[in-house]
Image (cartoon, helix red, strand yellow):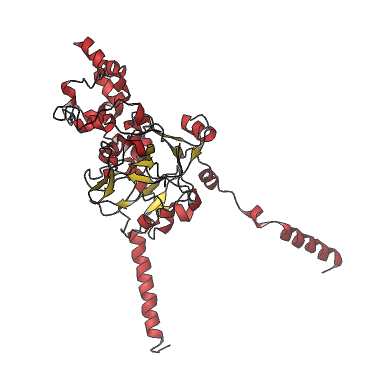
Amino acid sequence: MKSHVWRPLFVAVGLILLILVVRTFLVPDDFGVWERGYMYGWHRKGNEEEWKKVTVKYRTKAYCKECHAEKVESIGRSPHGILQCENCHGPAMNHPEDPPTLTIDRSRELCLRCHAKLVTPSSGRAGIPGIDPVTHNPEAECSLCHDPHHPNLEELKRHE
Amino acid sequence: MNRREFLKRSIVVVAGMALPTAALELIDPKKLLAAKPELRWVFLVDTYKCVGCGFCVKACKIENEVPYDADVTRTWVERYVITRDGKTHIDTPKGALNGFTSRKIDIGQGHTEEIRDEDIVQSFFVPKLCNQCENPPCVQVCPVGATYQTADGVVLVDRKWCIGCGYCIMGCPYGVRFFHPVYKVAEKCNFCYHRISKGMKTACVDACPFSARRIGNLRDPNDPVTKVIMTERVAILKEEYGTKPQVYYLGLSKEVR
């Protein structure tokens, strides 16, 4: 067995053994083949839990309602009632603890997302009242004349 | 061995050979359950209802901590404008993060194209997101087992395991994967796994004012989304790839790729 041919083979076998030993320490116990088989389910099971732990930032209207029930209810009856509060007021996160106040987006750009007039036959956009942002009071903030919570101008007069 | 013994043994051998190997296999209940689990997330997009406001993109980026101004996004909205000459113009400025506020079509590199209103035959919006394919090619190509499919059908990426080789980004026929600029690993839409596993809806579904986006459970026959998929004319993207996407579209037309 004492041959120059065998010696490298021992080195190779030793290396493979070393790699196998190191591998048992490095690969977590939950790494393996799970529900969807080797082709689609070969993974670290614990990662599924890691993804579930991501913090929820957008808490939806149901969360706003816990404190602002009256507002959610009255605005819900206006044409803008279909919008989530957080679309304009920003994600609630842990409001009122963190953040204590929400940053409201009052920019023209926010309103223009829906109300910039586009030619879009075969899309729901065609049914939304729209303006040309270049000619329709370009310097003014929309909320100067329109109440975002009661967008109908006629209705707005009644509120005043 | 006498004659009687010989015949006895022959019968045993023949009977044994006649037995299919499948009959000897023990049925693993776990495997059976995995083949037909109680829950399979499915998504429905109604392109008639989408108005291109982009609130979904905004909510997605904030909810999932994708750098807001970077040119990468888990979901986006495309605008299709089909003109009288038969041409299709497609754009998605910043993935429609700020919606579509201009009539000009973004043709890239800061250039825009103007289309006369009277030339427009059709124009509509198509939201895109990960299809959570039944046969995800992105998972097949991952060399390290960093991306995988959960039992409820969502394809996830293990950020600790991903080596950033980019095979999955090349492998996805829908182009929904990208490199996360902060974590430097593959990133994709995961149907807001942290929300749907808590009984909530995805951030984009919640943000959509027109219910153009909906999520449901394909295994529940009473689920309103499943009912639409089963009874109405829905389409999927790039069917010819055999990926079996699980995002269904209402009102998809041939121009949409």
How many numbered marks have been drawn onto this rendered protein structure? Answer: 0
Residue ID at (75%, 62%): B13
**Does residue B30 appear in the picture of this structure?**
yes
In the rendered image, the vertical position of residue A100 relative to residue A153, given as above or below = below
- Residue at the (55%, 45%) spot, across then down: B32
Q: Is residue B109 above or below residue B115?
A: below
Placement of the C terminus of chain A among the 4 image quadrants: top left
For the residue pair A55 and B236, the one nearer the viewer reads as: B236
Counting from the top left corner in percent of width and height, residue A10 is at 39, 80
Which residue is at the front of the view, B67 or A13? B67
The N terminus of chain A - image quarter:
bottom left
Looking at the image, can residue A94 be seen?
Answer: no
Residue lying furthest left in this view? A139
Task: Identify whether B257 is placed above or below B19.
Answer: above
Q: Which residue occupies the extreme right position in the image? A: B3
Q: Residue A22 at what x, y percent from top left?
A: 33, 65
Relative placement, left or right, of A90 versus B191 is: left
| Vertical arrangement, residue A9 with respect to residue A58, above or below | below
Which residue does the image show at 37% across and 51% down from the upper left? B175
B220 with respect to A49 (left or right): right
Q: Estimate the x, y position of residue A109 in percent, counting from the top left.
A: 21, 33
